[in-house]
Image: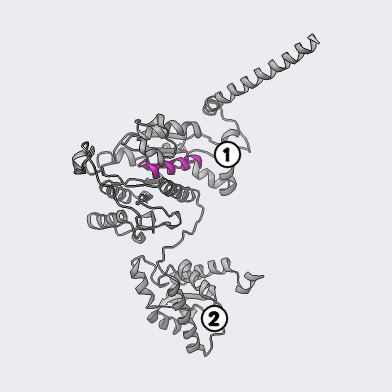
């Protein structure tokens, strides 16, 4: 009996020591793995791993990133989604994120988790207790430390292979070179101050840098209204409106800058500013940095987080060369689509004597108008008509066949102004191809997309 108890005790002690040693080794793993990665690359899947470029200081000091099974396993789902070659592009990329609050912290976090090889994190501000409702990684222990350093600390435990630079710095003309030099592949503008935002966007345009800008995420609650579009198309957003005006007035920039914005009108207003006495006071008297807001914008923490996730997704797919068709901003309602459908039927009856070859319903008209032609004439794909101007423009538009020899189907309808439709129907496709080859190729490409998405025969979609 004594021998049996000794045996059980020895087995129990061995199991306990084994568990303790396993936990100890797991805690040491990130540090040892990082050191091993920097000192001695281990090849897996052959020599064609994911490389971090040495040129322009992009990526890591180590020439290879995914040559260790832990790093490659961490990025497995991205590799499966993009393919190894496209993920390589992400790993070689350098992205600058300016503004590390609710939007910027989430954007930066997902860029890190997606395997971006080098990140520059820029913010002059510190983590506050009230910002914890929307920050991606900050905890109560981080309150009072610079946001840039907070992110770097947490990021090194998430993906230590990324080269992370943190600058506690305010973006302005004097810091432009320090922040934007080094040829970043993308710049993320997550700043909520108009002067600084306008200055940054103008500098990116001047330097030829790709930039994605976030507009107002505060005072909103509907995640389904968030969009990515050109700055000219952002509506219902006071910050976008002010930025558009300043860029046009001060720098002559009309558009060409993608932005993340919400179609939702702000649900609540700025809270009144109260001084130490508890009475309403002048906010400008308490500014630490001139021009930066002191009054509080009520924020539902989920919305800036989604803004940041949208920004990261947009940038990662761009870096990987993965084509994504963003949903166009078309401010039309069902009545507009019904009107265009009736107009098509009437035109077919007038021109061909029958509407039997109209093979689209109102839902398919919505797809053609919104997804293919973005609510505008196929001959004018600029973004000058937005909001109510787009509503008015519908009164001058109609759907007509691209090829008169084929039925009026999803893959054979274009949106034109009345006078453009008359001219189109007086010409043959051969004439258009000869006289306007670029227009012909663009329209053919769009209609081919519709054919692929809907199928050659619309009826096949119901079998």
Residue 312 highlighted magenta (yes or no): no
**Can residue 306 be seen at all in this image of the molecule?**
yes
Q: Is residue 44 left or right of residue 381?
A: right
Q: Which residue is mark 1?
A: 49
Query: Which type of secondary structure does the marked residue at label 1 adopt?
Result: loop
Query: Which type of secondary structure does the marked residue at label 2 adopt?
Result: loop
Q: Residue at x 33, y 58 (%)?
A: 255
Residue 102 highlighted magenta (yes or no): yes
Q: Nearer the viewer, residue 462 or 383?
A: 462
Q: Residue furthest right?
A: 1
- Residue 84 in the image, given as x and y percentages of width and height: 57, 45
Q: Nearer the viewer, residue 266 or 120?
A: 266
Q: Nearer the viewer, residue 136 or 441?
A: 136
- The C terminus sits in image quarter: bottom right
Q: Residue furthest front?
A: 278
Residue 181 to residue 388: above or below: above
Which region is colored magenta?
92-117
Q: Residue furthest top?
A: 2
Q: Residue at x 54, y 68 (%)?
A: 450
Q: Residue at x 26, y 57 (%)?
A: 245
**Can residue 385 be seen at all in this image of the molecule?**
no
Query: Is disc 1 in contact with disc 2, using a CB cutoff of under 8 Å?
Result: no
Measured in 3D between alpha carbons, the distance from the residue under mark 1 to the one under mark 2, in whole angstroms, is 53 Å
Q: Residues within 10 Å of mark 1 (few under 14, many from 20)?
A: some
Q: Disc 1 or 2, which lies upstream in sequence? A: 1
- Residue 399 in the image, given as x and y percentages of width and height: 46, 78
Displayed quadrant of residue 13 = top right
Number of the label disc, if any, that sits on residue 308: none
- Residue 249 in the image, given as x and y percentages of width and height: 23, 57
Number of the label disc, if any, that sits on residue 358: 2
Q: Residue at x 41, y 29 (%)?
A: 141
């Amino acid at each position: 009996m004594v021998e049996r108890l000794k045996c059980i005790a020895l087995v129990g002690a061995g199991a306990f020591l084994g568990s303790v040693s396993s936990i100890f080794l797991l805690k040491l793993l990130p540090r040892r793995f990082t050191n091993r990665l920097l000192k001695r690359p281990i090849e897996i899947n052959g020599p064609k791993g994911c490389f971090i470029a040495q040129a322009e200081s992009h990526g890591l000091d180590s020439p290879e990133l995914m040559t260790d099974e832990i790093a490659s396993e961490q990025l497995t789902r991205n590799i499966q989604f993009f393919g190894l070659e496209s993920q390589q592009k992400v790993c070689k990329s350098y992205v600058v994120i300016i503004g590390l609050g609710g939007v910027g912290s989430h954007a930066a976090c997902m860029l890190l988790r997606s395997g971006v090889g080098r990140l520059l994190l820029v913010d002059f501000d510190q983590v506050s207790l009230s910002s914890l409702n929307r920050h991606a990684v900050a905890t109560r222990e981080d309150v009072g430390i610079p946001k840039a350093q907070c992110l770097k600390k947490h990021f090194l435990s998430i993906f230590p292979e990324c080269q992370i630079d943190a600058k506690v710095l305010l973006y302005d003309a004097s810091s432009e070179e320090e922040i934007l030099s080094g040829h970043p592949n993308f710049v993320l503008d997550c700043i909520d101050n108009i002067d600084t935002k306008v200055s940054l966007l103008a500098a990116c345009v001047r330097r030829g840098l790709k930039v994605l800008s976030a507009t107002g995420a505060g005072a909103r609650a509907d995640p389904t209204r968030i969009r990515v579009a050109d700055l000219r198309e952002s509506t219902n957003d006071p910050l976008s409106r002010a930025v558009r005006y300043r860029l046009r007035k001060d720098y002559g920039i009309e558009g060409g800058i993608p932005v993340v914005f919400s179609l939702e009108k702000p649900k609540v207003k700025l809270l009144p500013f109260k001084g130490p006495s508890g009475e309403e006071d002048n906010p400008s008297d308490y500014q630490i940095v001139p021009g930066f807001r002191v009054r509080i914008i009520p924020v539902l923490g989920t919305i800036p987080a989604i803004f940041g996730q949208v920004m990261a997704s947009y940038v990662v797919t761009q870096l990987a060369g993965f084509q994504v068709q963003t949903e166009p901003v078309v401010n039309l309602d069902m009545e507009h689509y019904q009107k265009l459908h009736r107009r098509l039927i009437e035109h077919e009856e007038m021109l061909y004597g029958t509407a039997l070859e109209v093979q689209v319903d109102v839902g398919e008209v919505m797809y053609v108008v919104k997804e293919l032609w973005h609510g505008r004439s196929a001959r004018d794909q600029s973004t000058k008509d937005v909001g109510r101007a787009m509503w008015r423009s519908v009164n001058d538009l109609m759907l007509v066949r691209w090829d008169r020899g084929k039925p009026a189907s999803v893959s054979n309808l274009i949106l034109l102004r009345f006078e453009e439709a008359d001219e189109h129907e007086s010409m043959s496709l051969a004439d258009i191809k000869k006289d306007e080859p670029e227009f012909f190729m663009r329209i053919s490409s769009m209609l081919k997309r519709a054919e692929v998405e809907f199928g050659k025969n619309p009826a096949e979609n119901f079998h």
